[in-house]
Image: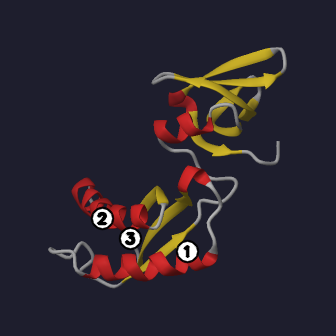
Amino acid sequence: MNLKQIDTIKEKIQPILSEKHLLLWDLSFFGGSPAVLTILIDGQDHQAIRMNQISEVTSLISDALDKVEPDPFPDRYNLDISSPGIDRSIKTDEHLDWALGQPIKLNLFEKIDGSKSAEGILKSFSDLEISLEVSPAEVKNFPREKISKISLNQEA
């Protein structure tokens, strides 16, 4: 699936989510047999969402996607709509902005200070690095190019 198709899907589902006071957290497509379109939704102001909300928007989004022309899914696919969960992945600068001041976990491509992960309070971020308060007296900077995954860390 290309970026234009993803943008088309976002355009079709955004009004539905807005009307229901929900936010799009993430959208991904994985090819396979069958392929899976995963849409992660969140409550307004990142409040928890209920199963009945997910059920309701799943039906509305499915109907809206069936009407997209040209069909971005000419083959069979599964639609998976769910909450990002409490240990949600953080993938965009918008997600990082929301997570400022919260505990996060970084998975690293290579060891830094003897570890391939780091945990702490997100203090700041830029295009080049993520700054975590790893202890009350210590803030460490991690180059973004060395980070493989960022997630909220509610276990902290």
Query: Is residue 46 toward the left or the right of residue 11 in the image?
Result: right
Q: Which of the 4 image quarters holds residue 6?
A: bottom left
Circles 2 and 3, Cβ within 8 Å, touching? The answer is no
Q: Residue at x 30, y 65 (%)?
A: 9
Q: Report whether 121 appears left or right of 30.
A: right
User: Disc 1 marks which amino acid?
Assistant: Gln
Q: Which quadrant, please, contains the C terminus?
A: top right
Amino acid type, callout 2: Ile
Q: Is residue 38 left or right of residue 156?
A: left
Q: Secondary structure at mark 2?
A: helix
Q: Can you say whether 114 is above or below 12 in the image? A: above
Foreground residue, 55 or 78?
Answer: 55
Mark 3 falls on what kind of element?
A: loop
How far apart in space, not on screen, are marks 2 and 1 (Cα)? 19 Å
Provide the residue designation for mark 2: 9
- The color scheme shown is secondary structure
Query: Which label is found at residue 31?
Result: 3
Most extreme residue toward the left, as rendered?
A: 70
Nearest to the eye among marks 2 and 3: give it.
2
Q: Position of residue 132 (x, y in %)?
A: 69, 25
Query: What label does residue 53 carry, if any?
Result: 1
> What is the crowding at mark 2: few (fewer than 14 residues within 10 Å), some, or many (at least 20)?
some
Q: Secondary structure at mark 1?
A: helix
